[in-house]
Image (cartoon, grey):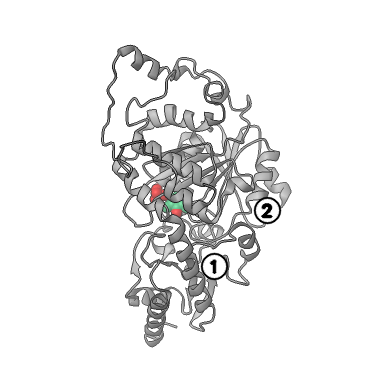
Amino acid sequence: MSHIETKCVQEGYKPENGQPRVLPIYQSTTYKYDSSSHVGDLFDLKVPGHMYTRISNPTTACVEEKIAALEGGVDAICTSSGQAASFMSVFNITGAGQNFVCSSAIYGGTVNLFNVTMKRMGIEVRFIVDGMSPGEIDALFDENTRLVFGETIANPALKVLDIEAYADLAHRHGVPLIVDNTFATPVLCRPFEYGADIVIHSTTKYMNGHASVVGGAVIDSGNFQWTDKYPELTTPDESYHGLVYTEQFGKKAYIEKARVQIMRDLGMTPAPISMFMLNEGLESLALRVDRHSQNALAVAEYLAGDKRVSWVNYPLLKGDTEYEKAKKYLKRGASGVVSFGVKGGRAAAMKFMDSLRLANIVVHVADARTCVLHPASTTHRQLTDEQLAAGGISPDLVRMSIGIENVEDIIADIDQALRRAEEAQCL
Ligand SMILES: *Cc1c(COP(=O)(O)O)cnc(C)c1O
């Protein structure tokens, strides 16, 4: 099973003789045991098995196994949202008084989580901003720095992370690199192949693919060597009567700690039926992401040649600032998200969006239907102008998530909406 298309369909649930062919939904909070001593062994983690659905569930476990296989990791845990996954991935190894280093080209919701909410927990995020010298970047690290965080294709600025450079930076400072791989998906890029240690996802986007279920995932490559610098993994956990995660779980220590400690205590648990729907989405992930990427490149090329459009960002568009990195990290495609400016600024962008017929205005990206959003007035409106600029977002930026419809219909819709914006003398 070496190809990603096959893994999408076949990994995870593998029925035995006479069992249902399709992943069953184990909509049960609890599990039945023959003896109380078995329950004791389960709680001591001496035998594998499920105790309680807040911590693990058989339906969820199959999806976790599939996602780990897709990324080429050793273990994964699913969460109730992408935000929960981002939080868990950092909080699992970072506490009050500690800090982490982060690319500034990341999702706006992650900026709020890191810069506001986690700050209130005493955890400090230190952003790498454009134009910093290598010396200035090194100076962000100190003995309390726990990790480096970045996003493969940043939402919505569409900046491509130089994963190898970020992995080198993290490893030189003895910390792991965590990458949010939501937009690329493991079909387009597997960050572990370039040295990333941990990957997270908002499965709400392409993985589910149909805009029906919010969810997230954290995956570990198993490659980072947890040393005494991370005592929460290498010394006894008093909340788990002296368990040492690296001794008990080896390469799976990071994810299993996240499960039996963070998930146990915070309960950001996905519902089994949500996992069933995610699994159905994953089966067609490779097919869909290829079509999204082909359509988006065609749309980006069309927009780049249209005089009513002031600029276009798409990583695989020739001449894009991200083109060289995209050629390296996104060989197969650059996903369905295109951003551009309509001549005439904010007013023209609004008229254009209001005139679209096939493409709907929604607060979402990365599902089968083409949709459109104005980040500066919606998803990113909490950010200051400086934060917007640091994330690569201008006031006229329109973000289009190109779906899997026929691309001629998508382009015809864009063309008529641009014409209406032009007729309204917005541009
Ligand atoms: C949407 C998104 C998130 C947050 O995920 P939710 O599932 O909405 O909580 C995190 N990172 C990226 C890149 C996203 O696009």
Residue 214 in sight in this render = no
- The verdict on label 1 being within 8 Å of ligand 1 is no
The amino acid beneath tag 1 is Tyr
User: In the visual, does 44 lie left or right of 319?
Assistant: left
- For mark 1, what is the residue? 314
In terms of image quadrants, where is residue 53? top left
Q: Position of residue 60 (x, y in %)?
A: 37, 38
Front one among 211 and 6:
6
Residue at position x 63%, y 24% in the image: 228
Q: Position of residue 318 (x, y in %)?
A: 61, 72
Mark closest to the chain's N terminus, 2 or 1 = 2
Q: Position of residue 126 (x, y in %)?
A: 58, 44
Front one among 275 and 301:
275
Q: Position of residue 240 (x, y in %)?
A: 44, 19
Residue 230 in sight in this render = yes
Tell me the quarter of the image containing the C terminus: bottom left
Front one among 306 and 32:
32
Tell me if mark 1 has few (under 14), some (14-19) or many (20+) residues whose alpha carbon lies within 10 angstroms of its own. many
Residue at position x 59%, y 38% in the image: 147
At mark 1, the secondary structure is loop
Question: What is the spatial separation of the Cα atoms under label 2 and label 1, in whole angstroms?
Answer: 24 Å
- The verdict on label 2 being within 8 Å of ligand 1 is no
Nearer mark to the viewer, of 2 and 1 = 1
User: In the visual, does 46 lie left or right of 168?
Assistant: left
Above or below 325: residue 54: above
The amino acid beneath tag 2 is Met
Front one among 373 and 358:
358
Residue that extends furthest to the front in the rendered view of this protein: 17
Mark number for residue 300? none
- For mark 2, what is the residue? 132
